[in-house]
Image: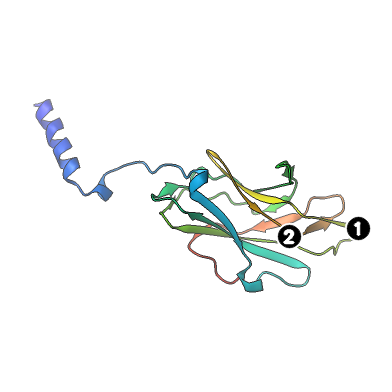
């Protein structure tokens, strides 16, 4: 009897359409992910302020999970960490990024030396950690803050879809 029930369950599960079967979605891998920056046609820039959309696109042939995406970081030219203070640092939610799909977050910062005393720095790269490596993108923007503190970066929550104007 148990064998007949197991056989019936197997037959029923294989008769379901592929999208109805529970199959785990693999983690996103570095080679299939592309990071880009989009300034929103200047919508983020103002007096002594800058910003950009950080856009992450799955260029792979299959959907992948971004559940393993860690918090963003900045690096120098040797890929050493650059200290910044994150305001509302938001890890990517546990969501599936379809093939060709995009997710985005807005980043904002002080771009001019308005502090007395102040200091500015320009990180070489922005890094997005995945479970299996890091995706990097050049970052040539000045980040400014008080002289004895790391500059502050504000990050908005991650959302699906292409960037909008700031």
> Taking 148 as reference, is 45 above or below it?
below
Residue at image x 40%, y 50%?
63
Which sits in the foreground, 5 or 49? 49
Q: Is residue 25 left or right of residue 147?
A: left
Q: Which mark is residue 117?
A: 1
Q: Secondary structure at mark 2?
A: loop
Query: Who comes first in sequence, dot 1 or dot 2?
Result: 1
Q: Position of residue 83 (x, y in %)?
A: 75, 46
Which sits in the foreground, 37 or 118? 37
* Residue named by callout 2: 141
Q: Position of residue 22 (x, y in %)?
A: 30, 43
Describe the colour scheme in one phrase: rainbow
Q: Position of residue 62 (x, y in %)?
A: 38, 49
Q: Position of residue 19 (x, y in %)?
A: 27, 50
Task: Give the class, few, some or many, for how many residues have Cα within 10 Å of label 2's Cα (few <14, many ≥20).
Answer: some
Quarter of the image where one finds residue 69: top right
Q: Is residue 159 left or right of residue 45?
A: left
> Taking 73 as reference, is 55 above or below it?
below
> Taking 158 as reference, is 75 above or below it?
above
How far, Cα to Cα, is label 1 from label 2? Answer: 20 Å
Q: Using the rendered image of the protein, determine whether residue 93 is visible from the camera's viewpoint.
A: no
Residue at image x 86%, y 49%?
148
Q: Secondary structure at mark 1?
A: loop
Q: Nearer the viewer, mark 1 or mark 2?
A: 2
Q: Is residue 101 left or right of residue 127?
A: left
Q: Quadrant of the N terminus?
A: top left
Residue at image x 48%, y 63%?
161
Residue at image x 84%, y 62%?
113
Q: Using the rendered image of the protein, determine whether residue 87 is visible from the camera's viewpoint.
A: yes
Q: Quadrant of the C terminus?
A: bottom right
């Amino acid at each position: 009897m148990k064998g007949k029930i197991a056989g019936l369950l197997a037959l029923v599960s294989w008769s379901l359409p592929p999208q109805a079967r529970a199959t785990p979605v693999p983690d996103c891998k570095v080679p299939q992910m592309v990071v880009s920056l989009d300034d929103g046609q200047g919508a983020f820039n103002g007096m002594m302020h800058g910003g950009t959309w950080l856009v992450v696109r799955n260029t792979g042939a299959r959907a992948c999970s971004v559940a393993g995406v860690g918090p963003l970081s900045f690096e120098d030219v040797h890929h050493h960490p650059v200290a910044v203070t994150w305001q509302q640092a938001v890890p990517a939610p546990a969501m599936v990024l379809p093939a060709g799909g995009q997710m985005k977050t807005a980043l904002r910062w002080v771009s001019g030396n308005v502090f007395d005393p102040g200091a500015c720095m320009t990180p070489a790269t922005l890094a997005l950690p995945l479970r299996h490596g890091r995706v990097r993108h050049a970052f040539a923007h000045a980040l400014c803050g008080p002289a004895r503190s790391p500059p502050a970066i504000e990050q908005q929550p991650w959302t699906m879809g292409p960037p909008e104007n700031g």
